[in-house]
Image (cartoon, helix red, strand yellow):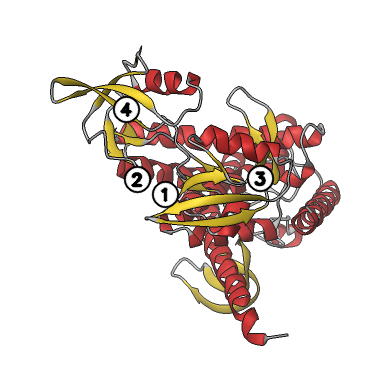
Amino acid sequence: MDIVSLVPQFGGVVWTVIAFVIALSIVVAVHEYGHYIVGRWSGIHAEVFSLGMGPVVASRVDRRGTRWQLAALPFGGYVRFLGDADAASSRASVTVHQLNEQERGRTMHGAPLWARSATVAAGPLFNFALSIIVFCGFFMVKGVATELPVVGEMKNLPGAAQMMEKGDRILAVDGRETDTLADFISVANTLPPAPSAEYRIDRNGSELTLTGPYPFPPVVDAVQAPSGANDAGIEEGDVILAVEGVQIASFRELRDAVGRSDGAPVTLSVWRAGETFDVTLTPRRMDIPLASGGFETRWLIGLSGGLLFEPETRTPGPIEAVWLGIQQTYTIITTSLSGLWHMITGAISSCNLQGPLGIAEISGAAASQGAGNFIWFIAMLSTAVGLMNLFPVPILDGGHLVFHAYEAVTGKPPSDRVLRILMTAGLAMLLSLMVFAVSNDILC
């Protein structure tokens, strides 16, 4: 075997690992800092803040007596509070009982219930906060579309004159009025695929009638990672001219042709910056969340399209941007929970559950598409980590919150014996889920 031929593959693996470690480290650091800072505010002393697991590579002790350390295995982290027996915050009963009343109040298990609950919940909440901040920043930098169908920028299409200009307002498409951008999209969705469409526009107070491309041309707006399209090297801005030698004029025709392939490889003719070339890729069977709820199973190549122009945008105010960030985070949470429920009930394939290998592949592909895509992925991963930690499984934050709820109702925490049994069961469940997810990464 030619060793040199393996270098690009090895480089790709290294890049994927680096991207995964960076993304996971950021998310874990934010999560654990949430535990640490709220614990500190609540009077609970943190003995160790560790980024990574295993042997310690570097460490320092701050003026509060907390040891901040970097461990050799960059796949997790923890905060060990005073009175914790381990990184999972199991109770070290002997140590706690040896402390006086004042010192006991600085431990994770001797502090008031509200302080312990706030400290535990802070990790996932900080993850959600990171996601909201990132999404908020994206909306403020990139803007949001205005309500009117006004052209912000025309997309580059082969052989098509720039028939519309920045600032043009589209009044009608094929004789149907479009008062708002939502009207334009609604009308465009009802038009049958065709090489062209007629547009009536307002340009600087003058009405013009122009003939231009179909409202939803086969232009690539985004490439999903991982996907057949990403593997084939298709990029944002590429135009799909034909599928299996049959010319297409709309993104809908591309989607339908891929759907009819039933998973067989398809050959696309692609136009990029004046050059045309062919690529062959294999669709993947995927379960897609629907806006109305539920999922739809389709054959996909990982491409998404849009309008023939970028709509005019405006910069949202801080409050609106934060609200949009909250909505984006909420959508990820509800979609994830819906997907999990549909997997449990067997409505969709359990292959949708990805493990560390699958997440690493996505992180590497996102990083290769640019800093913006990678940062967006980190925000999505942060939401997923926060949500997972809220599941009511012993050893996770959600499990600890359940113990605290039990204590609030009964007036006393579960016994040490019960806690040990539940924590062991929780660890077994988590390890089993991890093995299942990794098997999905390999076999699906």
Q: Are marks 2 and 1 in contact (CB under 8 Å)?
A: yes
Q: Is residue 77 left or right of residue 437?
A: left
Q: Amino acid at mark 4?
A: Thr
Q: Residue at x 62, y 51 (%)?
A: 267
Q: Is residue 106 left or right of residue 84?
A: left
Disc 4 versus disc 1: nearer the observer: 4
Q: Residue at x 25, y 25 (%)?
A: 169
SS for dot 3 = helix
Q: Upstream in the sequence, badge 3 or badge 1?
A: 1
Q: Which residue is mark 3?
A: 388
Q: Which residue is mark 2?
A: 156
In terms of depth relative to the viewer, which is nearer, 183 or 198?
198
Q: Which residue is mark 4?
A: 211
Above or below, 301 relative to 211: below
Q: Amino acid at mark 3?
A: Met
Q: Which residue is mark 1?
A: 237
Q: CA distance from mark 3 to mark 4?
A: 51 Å
Q: CA distance from mark 2 to mark 1?
A: 8 Å
Disc 3 versus disc 1: nearer the observer: 1
Above or below, 150 relative to 362: above
Q: Upstream in the sequence, badge 3 or badge 4?
A: 4
Q: Is residue 387 left or right of residue 183?
A: right
User: How many numbered discs sit on the rendered protein?
Assistant: 4
In terms of depth relative to the viewer, which is nearer, 384 or 398?
384
